[in-house]
Image (cartoon, coloured by chain):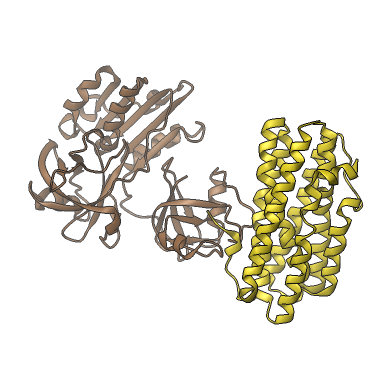
Amino acid sequence: MPQDMSAGQLDPANALDVVVSAITQEADGILSFDLRAPDDAPLPAWRAGAHIDVCLPNGMTRQYSLCGAPDDRASWRIGVLREVDGRGGSAFLHDGIAAGDSLRVSYPRNHFGLIDADRYLFVAGGIGITPILPMLAEVQRRGKPYTLLYGGRSRQTMAFVTELAQFGDNVILAPQDEVGLPDIAGFLADPAPGTVAYVCGPEPLVDAVEALCADWPIGRLHRERFAPKTKPAIEPGGFEVELSQSGQRLYVPPEESLLSVLQDAGCDIDNSCTAGICGTCLVKVLAGTPDHQDDVLSDDERASGEVMLVCVSRAASDLLVLDL
Amino acid sequence: MVNVRNVRGGDGLADIRAEVDDILESVIENTRQATEDFFESYGENPDPKILSAWIEPRAWREIDYVFLLNEQIRRYGMQFSRKHITLLAKQSFQEAEHYEMVGEVIESLGGTVPKSVPAQAKPWSDFLWDCLERHPLAAIAAWNVSETSASGSFEPTFKAGEKFGFDAVVKVYKKIAIDEKFHVGLGVQILSDYAKTDHDREEILRAMRGMRDLAWKTFTPASVKANI
């Protein structure tokens, strides 16, 4: 899941250098990169759904899902689709990076974690398979029933098809040139109680799944999107907020509080003063820069950027990702 | 954890901050102890009417706060910013909600919701109204101590709730505990912003010292015996 981050800078406290130990052609236009610590020390632990920021030598920073095995602490794997209409990040990785090169990357973060459920439905489109792949192994390990519907233009363009064979009949491959568009509606119809769905892929796919799951209980659909090619128009003073647990993205207009937008979206956030004095509406910030306008967080709490009071505070960045 | 007593504001309390903090800490501890003592004695005879009698003076406090806050705004509000007028009014609204919620709990326990000041609450109430007469910040200082003291009662009440099963009381006081953080923070901010002179600070300390000696007394087992 590539996403543009501004400034190309990583927080030194949460970044490390890795070496590209191998590059593998996984499909047409898709390479995987195996990353190891320079001294082969164990890499930080992660769980299915996690991603890292990759700071490219040309100054760009991109986010990629980890798609290897979480219990392999010696190596991380990311899958990179060459984006035809991209801004050059994926092209740089494809054309400008070789085995043996160093990259600066962030510690893993996870806004798309696997929750406990009775049954799992996974929908992946194209490179959206990358965060889903480790999830399959995890739910299989837990002994939970699951099915993956994986669509792409053709088998040649779909990465990790061979690797998916280990999951047998739990995987439905849907190359468009063989079977047409995947029957997502049929796949998601009449879910058994306790079912959760995870979707990752192009915007139209995620939108379609969202629409089909509109009546599902809150928290049962989890999505991860590619960055939209055209960002929504953001007015001065407005900003976007992403809810990490569901992937839902909301727009906060300049005249509305973040608390109000979150409540309208169904988030149950305790609050009392709505004036930045009591601290009740404290929320964890996972990404983005809060614009603190409260009266009660300490200087250290503000500087950490890890928490904010949503009743009055806003965003200094275009996007905030909250642990909701 | 967010500490509302460190709310941003002016430096009006800077010279007396140490004593203010001592007063607030001591009143929390006294109230905590009084509450624990009450529930220890309650355990010998867990009669809902005893619990109701223990809560009744605090129901009065809630509605008395409504009267006091509105009189505070009427009498002194134009000395404050519009933001602070709004927040005091918001506090008043919440105190009215608390009176309603605590009233429902009292009735569910078989008690009677007070509509005039109960004997156990009279010293507390008289002191607050006297403070309101004396100085624009005195009542705010006094009820800041009183509100802070209540926070000492919450955890022992919740623990007792688990033990004796009075879930409705716990539910109400968990909501009140959230609002009290706002009330305490607002009081500290107003005192910090508007205390300008030594006389202001003397009145604030007088009010706080006086309420320190009163606030915890309605939480004791003895206060309940006087009510039944």
In depth, the one of A45 and A109 nearer the eye is A45
Q: Residue at x 16, y 60 (%)?
A: A58
Task: Tell me the quarter of the image containing the C terminus of chain B.
Answer: top right
Tell me the yellow chain.
B
Q: Residue at x 85, y 47 (%)?
A: B223
In x, y percent, where is residue B181? 64, 55
Res B201 quadrant in image: bottom right
**Taking B44 as reference, is A163 left or right?**
left
Res A199 quadrant in image: top left
**Taking B157 as reference, is A229 left or right?**
left
Which residue lies most toward the top here? A169
Q: Residue at x 79, y 39 (%)?
A: B105
In the rendered view, would you say B81 is above or below A95?
A: below
Q: Residue at x 58, y 52 (%)?
A: A280
In depth, the one of A129 and B140 nearer the eye is B140
In the rendered view, would you say A324 is above or below B196?
A: above
Q: Is residue B137 visible?
A: no
In depth, the one of A296 and B131 nearer the eye is B131
Tell me the brown chain.
A
**Taking B142 as reference, is B123 left or right?**
right
In x, y percent, where is residue A125? 28, 35
Q: Is residue B173 visible?
A: yes
In x, y percent, where is residue A295? 56, 65
In the rendered view, would you say A33 is above or below B143?
A: above
**Taking A103 as reference, is A262 left or right?**
right
